[in-house]
Image (tube, coloured by chain):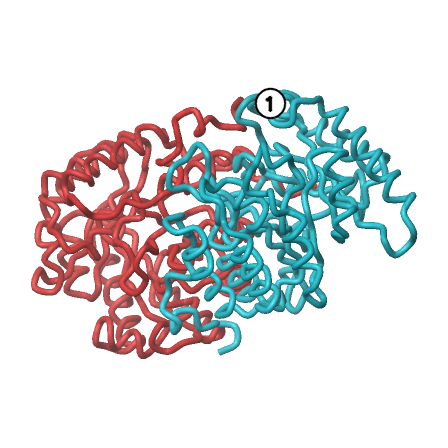
Chain colours: A cyan, B red
């Protein structure tokens, strides 16, 4: 028998308001971000990465981070995630009251220096400080801390990334106190065989501290990599509505995997996301108005509603 | 250990000149078809479905079928495949000297009537006649006969297709004498869980008579379905250069899976296709000139050559 995934719950974690907007040229007005987040939660998304606590001078799009988090915290049942690139960002994130803080940690040493201007070891040290800070907070106010290991599957600067180094960094993050370690295909270079191998290796090193998969669709392999990760028991996937954000080095290629396509595929496979596809697709209108002209990706939203009829439920 | 596919040979069977062109509005001049086929073979494609033996009144694009086959037969080492929708087409295909003849057989009874104006049982009967005709030929002149089971994963007319019916039809095709039975996602409705289940069921019924996977990318699940089929031991995949042909009911959604993306993914996974990706991508120029304005799909061809650098070979 094929190992069945029928009826298993999957968490689709929407990262568009953070990872998507981070790459758009236009500033999306705060009110549109809030509409987007509200509509996404109403469509059934249970976790949304709503912003990044970076200096507005670096990413002006994130200048309204506090207001965006405040709004999201008002939505009942929503798990509010944020990104913090360093300890200062963690402090602001904790002040904001976010439920989950992700610290990006590049396995590629050269990418780490280029992207956040410090070494991977310094980034892990920040994660350690973040976890100590979390532990010093009163119980009930402690956010979850996730290490988002990036450039795990290849780096545009360094090329191939050592799988043993990924495992070592994952262990170091757990030792630093991180609740979970996610694996990110930052550059969109992953292939399905590599995804299976890498998730299996890291799981055997850190067990249930292994978090979700953050996959990009640069080469068009995004959903193929999801299938590979599912085979390895991964049950949390980051994705972005309309694949928002594009890709810095490949015109026409999407950045993050497209939430609409991901949700439909998972549901068709018999997994349960708890998400209403029609309501999800309707949110594209908020993006079209909030950042007009920005390309919106995805196959499923282009289908006639009749062609989106599930072959599972029929 | 993850079951390794490292170093395993995969046959990528190019169907663009048949399935792709069948859906384009413009007639591609014969000389362009011949250039395309020659270039594809030179890039390392070992099997190409070069045309369909349908009446030119039905598909004018295929009026030059004999000339196209003649040209393809002149290419050393190339396995020349053709499609024949009925016994009359089989007779013409045999005359042409093609190495392999695929007969499409719809599992969806209503699709069969709508598409080829006869029942599934009549189509299987034609396959039986085709196989008897093949057996009557002198040894060395007998083409391989494949049943291409279509609408296996869902039908736009009938909706859900019975998996038990697929198995029964596959067995009937083998009993009719077909050398192999391929499974086609004609409508692009397949999901990876279903692909695994269906290939496993049919293999357990007909063993090594199970042929390849013919997958479409209508919903964007094409390569995800390839991964699922690989897990079930499928080693032959149909695809179309530039995803040629589009999709009749979903603007912007490709028809067949894109050969360029498929080849790069398989190679990155450590499988061997024998195909030179750069030479493959260069053929898009022939399509751009032969059928100008036709949309060319694919993620990998849009990447900078540097971004196509293999993370495997590095």
Viewer-side residue, A283 vs A204: A283
Q: Is residue B300 left or right of residue B101?
A: right
Whether residue A230 can be seen here: no
Residue B126, by quadrant, is: bottom left
Horizontal and vertical percent position of residue A273: 62, 65
Q: Position of residue A226 (x, y in %)?
A: 57, 50
Question: Relative to B165, does residue A102 appear above or below in the rendering?
Answer: above
Point 13% across, 42% down: residue: B70
Where does the image place residue B96, in percent across and percent down from the top left?
14, 49
Task: Give the number of marks.
Answer: 1
Q: Which quarter of the picture shows residue B277?
A: top left
Give the residue number, with chain letter if any, for mark 1. Answer: A114
Quadrant for the N terminus of chain A in the image? bottom right
x 20%, y 38%: residue: B36
Q: Is residue B39 above or below residue A141?
A: above
Residue closest to the eye, A170 or B83: A170
Element at badge 1? helix
Q: Which quarter of the picture shows residue B278?
A: top left
The chain under label 1 reads: A
Query: Within 10 Å of the Cα at label 1, are there few (<14), some (14-19), or many (20+) other Cα atoms?
Result: few
Q: Residue at x 48, y 72 (%)?
A: A310
| Residue A69 shown left or right of residue B76 in the figure | right
Q: Is residue A154 visible?
A: yes
Residue A90, position in %: x, y? 76, 39
């Amino acid at each position: 028998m094929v190992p069945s995934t029928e009826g298993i719950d999957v968490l689709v974690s929407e990262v568009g308001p953070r990872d998507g907007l981070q790459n758009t040229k236009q500033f999306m007005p705060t009110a549109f971000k809030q509409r987007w987040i509200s509509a996404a939660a109403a469509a059934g998304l249970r976790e949304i990465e709503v912003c990044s606590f970076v200096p507005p001078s670096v990413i002006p799009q994130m200048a309204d981070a506090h207001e965006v988090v405040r709004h999201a915290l008002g939505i009942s049942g929503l798990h509010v995630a944020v990104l913090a690139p360093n300890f200062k960002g963690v402090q602001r994130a904790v002040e904001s009251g976010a439920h989950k803080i992700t610290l990006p940690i590049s396995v590629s040493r050269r990418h780490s220096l280029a992207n956040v201007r410090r070494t991977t070891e310094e980034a892990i040290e920040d994660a350690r400080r973040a976890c100590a800070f979390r532990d010093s907070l009163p119980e009930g106010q402690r956010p979850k801390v996730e290490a988002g290991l990036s450039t795990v599957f290849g780096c545009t600067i360094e090329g191939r990334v050592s799988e043993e180094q990924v495992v070592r960094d994952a262990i170091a993050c757990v030792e630093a106190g991180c609740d979970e370690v996610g694996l990110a295909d930052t550059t969109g270079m992953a292939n399905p065989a590599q995804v299976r191998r890498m998730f299996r290796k890291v799981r055997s090193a850190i067990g249930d501290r292994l978090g979700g998969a953050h996959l990009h669709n640069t080469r068009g392999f995004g959903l193929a990599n999801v299938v590979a990760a599912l085979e390895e028991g991964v049950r949390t996937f980051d994705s972005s509505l309309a694949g928002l954000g594009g890709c810095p080095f490949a015109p026409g290629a999407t950045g993050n995997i497209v939430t609409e396509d991901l949700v439909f595929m998972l549901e068709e496979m018999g997994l349960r996301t708890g998400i209403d596809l029609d309501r999800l697709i309707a949110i594209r209108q908020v993006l079209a108005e909030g950042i007009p002209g920005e390309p919106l990706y995805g196959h499923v939203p282009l289908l006639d509603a009749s062609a989106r009829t599930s072959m599972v439920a029929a």
